Amino acid sequence: MRIKRKFFLAVLVIMPALAFAQGGGFDDGFFYGMLGAGLVIVMFALYALVRSFAAQQGLMLATSGDQSDYAGRQDHVLRSSGEATGGHSDVTMDVWDDEKDILLNHNYDGIMELDNRLPPWWLALFYVTIAFAVFYVPYYHIFTDWSSAKEYEEEMAAAKKEIAAYQKTHGGGITDETVKLLTDEPSLAEGQKIYAKNCVACHAADGGGGVGPNLTDKYWLHGGGIKNVFHTITNGVPEKGMIAWKTSLTPKQIQQVASYVLVKLQATTPADPKEPQGEPYEPEKEGQ
């Protein structure tokens, strides 16, 4: 039994260290190491519980099978003296023969207390807290300058970088108010591809219009300029049959195709232009 106990304690101490070395980092490796140690503790506790239950069952069977022996074991009567009962000489206690050696030298209103051993599962949990402290205290309070505030700042900085990367790739954060007209050729080339794939059916390849209005003149049904065109493409015009493209295009893509319309199609001459619709838009009035 002592060998098993020493082996169990060795597992509790060594397992987190091995997990730290194998995992290459404290957080994940230590977590899984302690999780494994916890499973070992649970198994050990269940084993100890089963053994304790089996021992109690065996004792009950033994006493029930021999009533004379049971009665004989209770013949031992300890009449409390000043030493045993704290001065209460009128107290009489029945004690098992095999319990007299662990009987504590005090009582509470005639109730005696036995110096029983702590349950193995309780001791195991106590030992694992000690093993945990052996690694936790040096790592967090001696060898590193870790703090919850510093960890929070590092995680926030990492999150901001991820957000910036996402916005750069997908155009996140672009709204009707913040959108800007793009004039660089790569962006306009991407806008042309999006237009050819999604807009030609209603506005024609050269922007002259068809089911949808002419995009080459200065007349606009829902306002011209990058902000108005971006808003129209984003939210659509359901009553006219134009869908909201925000469900299939990213804000960055909508910005690119809107810029393509305003930079490449405006003021061109389509082959079969549709008659003007809406009101004329003057960019200089909007500061664009």
Image (cartoon, rainbow, N blue to C red):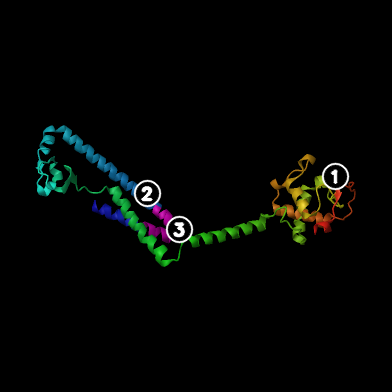
Query: Measured from the top left, where is residue 34 in percent x and y?
Result: 39, 54
Q: Residue placed at 22% from the left, 39% from the top?
A: 56
Which of 156 and 281 lies nearest the eye of the viewer? 281
Task: Identify the magenta region.
Answer: 15-34
* Badge 1 element: loop
Marker disc for residue 189: none
Amino acid carrying label 1: it is: Gly
Query: Measured from the top left, where is residue 182 in percent x and y?
Result: 76, 59
What secondary structure do most residues of the magenta stretch adopt? helix
Amino acid carrying label 2: it is: Leu
Q: Callout 3: 10 Å neighbours few (<14), some, many (20+)?
A: few
N-terminal-most mark, 1 or 3 = 3
Marker disc for residue 27: 3
Which of 275 and 14 lies nearest the eye of the viewer? 275
Which of 86 and 210 lies nearest the eye of the viewer? 86
N-terminal-most mark, 1 or 2 = 2
N-terminal-most mark, 3 or 2 = 3
Q: Is residue 72 left or right of residue 187?
A: left
Q: Callout 1: 10 Å neighbours few (<14), some, many (20+)?
A: some
* Badge 3 element: helix
The residue beneath circle 2 is: 39
Marks 1, 2: nearer the viewer = 1
Amino acid carrying label 3: it is: Asp
Q: Residue placed at 12% from the left, 36% from the top?
A: 69
